[in-house]
Amino acid sequence: MSRPRPVHTRAARRLLVAQGWVIGCVAASECHAATAPTPLAYFLHSAGPASAPVRLLGWGLAALCVGVCVAIATLLALAFRGTRDAADPSLQSDATPEDKEAEARGAAAEGWANRGNDSGATSPTDRRANRIVGIGTAISTVLLFGALLSMLRVLAAVADPPRASTLTVHVTAYDWWWKASYSTPSGASFATANEIHIPTGEPVQIELESADVIHAFWVPALAGKTQAIPGQVNRQWIEADHPGVWRGQCTQFCGPQHAHMALEVVAEPPDAFARWTGNEARPAAAPGNAAAQHGAQVFMARCAACHTVRGTDATGAQGPDLTHLASRRLIAAGALANTSANRLDWIAHAQRIKPGSLMPGIVLTPAEAGDLGAWLDTLQ
Ligand code: HEC
Ligand SMILES: [Cu+2]
C-alpha cells in the first residue's frame, strides 16, 4: 500500500531544493561577474593590501554560511527520514502506521517536555537530544568566535597602511562629482576631477570632505567605503599592487544624480605617475590659433564663473577644474567618455545627460561651439 508522504517531508524537500537554487544562482552570478566587466565586483577582485583581506574575509564568511546551510539541510533531511522510518509499516508490522507515527512524535515531544525536569527520570531520548543540542551549541560558538576574531584581524589590518603614506590626495565630494586636490612631495599643487592618479605599490592617504551633503567614497577593488561629511575630514588609505584603472562610486544617496557620481582611480608605475603630476602642475597652454583664441574668449564669457583653467582668468570654483580636461578618460563623473563630440554634447545638454546637475545646458551658436571645442581640445 502506498501512503502519501507526510507533509513535513515534502516541506523539507522543498527547503532543500530552494537552498540549492539560491546557492546555485549566487554562484552563477559570481562566475558571470568574473568574466563580464563588472568593476564593482569586489567579491572576486581586489587590487591592493587595503582590500585583499576584506575579500578573503568575505570568502571565509560565505563558505561558513554555505557550510551551515548545507549542514542544517542535511540534518533536517536525516531527522525527517528518521521519523518516517520509525512510522514505516513495512519496517514495524505490529501497529498501524498512524499509531507508530503518533508514538514516535509523542516520544520526541515527551523527551523535550521532560528536559531539565528534576524528577530524575530522564529518558534515553531526552539525554540524546540534550547531547545533540549541547554539541551544536558548542560548534556554533567556536565558529562564531572564529568569525569574530578574523573580522577583528581584518579591521586591524586595513585600519592603517603598512608604512607611512608619502602622498595625500584631498578629495572633496560635490553634488555630483569629485574634486581631487594634490600637493605632491615635489611641491606641485593642482586639482583635477573624477580621476585620481596614484603610483603603484605606495599607500596613498585620501582626505575626504564634502562641499554639500553626505556622500561616500568607495573604490571596491582598492578599499572599503568611507563617508564624506560636510565640515569634517575623514581619512582612508588606498594602495594598488599593479597598474590599472579601478572604478569608484558614491555610495551614500546624495540626490537625483547620485548614481552618476562615479570616479576612476588610475594606478601607474612611479615614473608614469611623476610624468602625470608634472603635466597636471603646468598651467594651460596659450591658444595656438585664431579658433582656439576665440574659443577661450567664449569660455571666459560663459563658463569662467564656475570653472577654473589655471593660466587664464577663469577661477570659478563651482564646477571641476578644467586646466587639463582633455587628458581625462571620462567626463561628468563617469557619465560620458571624454571625446570632443561628447564634451560639446555635455555643454549643450548637461540637463538631459544628468537632469538636475548643477551645470546648466548652455546655448551657443555653431561657430561659438566649434571654437570653444577647438580650445577645450588643447587642454591636454
Ligand atoms: C553654473 C555653473 C556652471 C557653468 C556656467 C558651467 N559649468 Fe561646466 N560644470 C559645472 C558643474 C557643477 C559641473 C559638474 C557636473 C556634474 O558632473 O554633475 C560641470 C562640468 C563640466 C564639464 C565636465 C568636466 C569633467 O571633468 O567631468 C565640462 C567639460 C564643463 N562643465 C564645461 C563647461 C563649459 C565649456 C561651460 C561654458 C560653456 C560650462 N561648463 C559652464 C558648472 C558649470
Ligand atoms: Cu554622492
Image: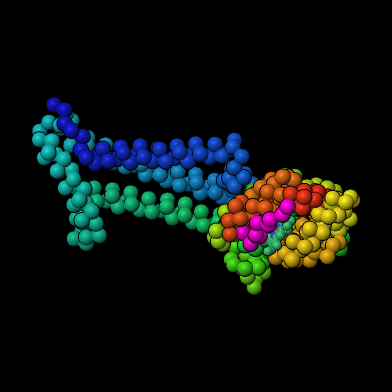
Is residue 363 within the magenta segment? yes
The answer to whether residue 290 is above or below residue 17 is: below
In this rendering, the count of numbered labels is: 0
The answer to whether residue 271 is above or below residue 255 is: above
Left or right of 8: which side holds 49?
Answer: right
Q: Determine if residue 170 is in view.
A: no
Position in image of residue 276 (x %, y %): 82, 51
Left or right of 94: which side holds 201?
Answer: right
User: Which quadrant holds the N terminus?
Assistant: top left
> Between 158 and 379, which is closer to the camera in this rendering?
379
Residue extent of the magenta highlight:
357-365
Q: Determine if residue 33 is in view.
A: yes
Quadrant housing residue 213 = bottom right
At x 71% / y 49%, what residue is drawn? 344
At x 40% / y 37%, what residue is drawn? 20
Is residue 89 within the magenta segment? no
At x 43% / y 55%, what residue is drawn? 141
Position in image of residue 39 (x %, y %): 62, 45
Left or right of 361: which side holds 371?
Answer: right
Left or right of 294: which side holds 45?
Answer: left
Quadrant housing residue 293 = bottom right
